[in-house]
Amino acid sequence: MEWVETLLQRSCNNTLTKGEVLHSLFHMIEINENTLNQIQTDKRDFGPELEELKNTEIKDLDFHLKYYRSLVNYINSITKK
């Protein structure tokens, strides 16, 4: 994840602080969690084709949540040099 550290360093050098980057990631996590929750709690029957699309969307959101959380963990582990 060297590219993340490089991006974070460039951001810190120009406009964004570590806290701002984390805030942005937390916002994305919140949005994805809310969307995932809405999709999972919708119990309407859309038929097999749309049900497959729904399941794909759930998998995609789950992947993004894991990715954003791993970025948060990685960024939190970076110390100033």
Image (cartoon, rainbow, N blue to C red):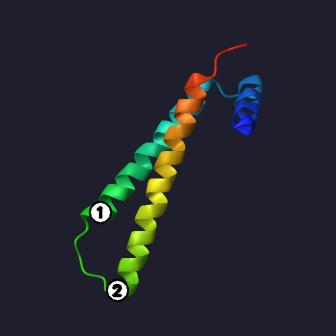
Residue 79, placed above or below residue 59: above
**Picture coordinates of residue 31, whole percent (x, y):** 43, 49
Residue drawn 53% across the image and 43% down it: 68
Which numbered circle lies on residue 40? 1
Which numbered circle lies on residue 67? none
Q: Quadrant of the N terminus?
A: top right
Residue drawn 53% across the image and 33% down it: 72
The image quadrant that residue 58 belongs to is: bottom left
Instruction: Assess disc 2: are there few (<14), some (14-19) or many (≥20) residues with their C-alpha within 10 Å of its C-alpha.
Output: few
Which residue matches tag 2?
48
Residue at the top extreme of this rendering: 81
Front residue of 81 and 30: 81
- Type of amino acid at the residue the image marks with label 1: Gln
Label 2 element class:
helix
Q: CA distance from mark 1 to mark 2?
A: 16 Å
Residue 61, placed above or below residue 67: below
**Picture coordinates of residue 53, whole percent (x, y):** 43, 76
